[in-house]
Amino acid sequence: MEERVVMHSTPEKHREIEAHAALALQAILAGREPSPGDLDPVTGDLRACLFALLDALHADGPQGARKAFLALAKDRPYLMQMAVTDPPVFNPDGTLAPPAAESEPPARRIRFVSSLDILQRPSQQWLLPALLPRDALVLVYGLSGGFKSFLVMAWALAIGTGTPWLGRVPTRAPVAYIAAEGGYGLKKRLRAWMTWHDWQDAGELGVKWYDQPLAMQEPAHLAELLTALREDFEQPPALVVVDTLSRCAAGADEDSNTDMARVLAAADIIREQFHCTILLVHHVGKDQQKGPRGASALLCNVEAAISVTPTAVGSKVECAKTKDARPFERMYLHAQEVRYGPEEDDCSLVLIRGDASAEADRPLMGRDEQAMYDLLLDKALTYTEWIKAATAPERGEARLTETAAKIALSALKKAGRVQQSEPRGPYTIVPLPAGDPTGE
């Protein structure tokens, strides 16, 4: 590999050329044309790399430039260093300004402290008592359709405004919310929350939003995110929500502990720089009993994990993991429709306190389970009759395969939704308790 700068120069001139190269590199990774004044002084392999990245930017946009950068940086560590360090500063006369505190030795990161220092540290602090610890990594996971984002958004707005959530009084602080799944639903949910809480001033909600996906584990994305968190907030955010993890770790293999460790390392860098809580929203795996989807590194490396399970009327929220704190009690939430305007579509949902009724404690049925359940309403069918009814050709597109029908039947039995009066007898629906609000 060639030298980065192939020219005879003084150390000062060499440092000045590399500073111009760093500015050009950071501009390209941000999707901007670099200044000719930053490109022209650079020679050798470094110049070739910059022009290769510039060609990728012109051909495929910022994503193409970042992809080319990762390929080039594999055997050029100095490129990665240039991408993540603070941009250099030049004096008005064009000379490079010296680094701050250049004469001081670098601060030592590893430092041992005494037992007395440990005992004098403050106790655990909370953003939301018994739910969200301060300065921590927190994972919220569950099935799609379980209102995870509604729940996390409610927590973010409670912290941003200082509004109590189900009796818990939060620490009011700025919040950064990465809503990577974006969409029009974000506006609707925000309007519904403001209407339900009678909150008039959107400028005082205390939450700022970014509604595009990103790749936290990529140095260029992480550097840009850190810059945005510094420059877009008057005070450092105390909570950074990553919703969802899969949309904010583009290109990472969720089943790879190595890839997930890189994502968590990026989250830790944000936490350390701002002393904030990072709340990761994630999906559950195929087997819900095994916890969050993907690598075990996720659950092993967070301070707290919260499971959200969809129910027939809303969500069930449980503590899956907590460090050095008592687990909170299981909570049931009810999805309440809120209308905020005159149009038919001017509505969304908020989650309110619910009851642990027999139906609310059951998981929400999947499509096949619902189909099997509906076939049994007001009937008593043997195993064979029930399977035959589900697989009948006349059901058309609603027809289930025999395997799907058997799996759904087993799930309904396990959930306690159906019963047999005697062994090998016909199946019937388990009646809801008298007075249950869902027993229409």
Image (cartoon, rainbow, N blue to C red):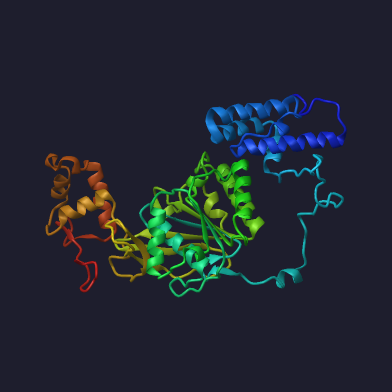
Residue 13 lies in what quarter of the image? top right
Image height of 227 relative to 207, above or below = above
The number of discs equals 0
Residue at x-position 62% and y-position 30%: 53
Choose between 67 and 118: the one closer to the eye: 67
Q: Is residue 208 left or right of residue 109?
A: left
Residue 436 lies in what quarter of the image? bottom left
Question: Is residue 28 something one can see in this rendering?
Answer: yes
Image height of 440 relative to 377, above or below = below
Image height of 278 relative to 384, above or below = below
Q: Is residue 275 left or right of residue 115?
A: left
Where does the C terminus fall, quadrant-wise? bottom left
Residue at x-position 71% and y-position 44%: 87
Where does the N terminus fall, quadrant-wise? top right
Image height of 251 relative to 104, above or below = above
Q: Position of residue 283 (x, y in %)?
A: 43, 51
Question: Is residue 131 something one can see in this rendering?
Answer: no
Choose between 268 and 230: the one closer to the eye: 230
Q: Position of residue 252 (x, y in %)?
A: 53, 41
Q: Position of residue 247 (x, y in %)?
A: 48, 45
Choose between 427 and 275: the one closer to the eye: 275
Residue at x-position 49% and y-position 64%: 205
Q: Position of residue 288 (x, y in %)?
A: 40, 53
Choose between 14 and 344: the one closer to the eye: 344
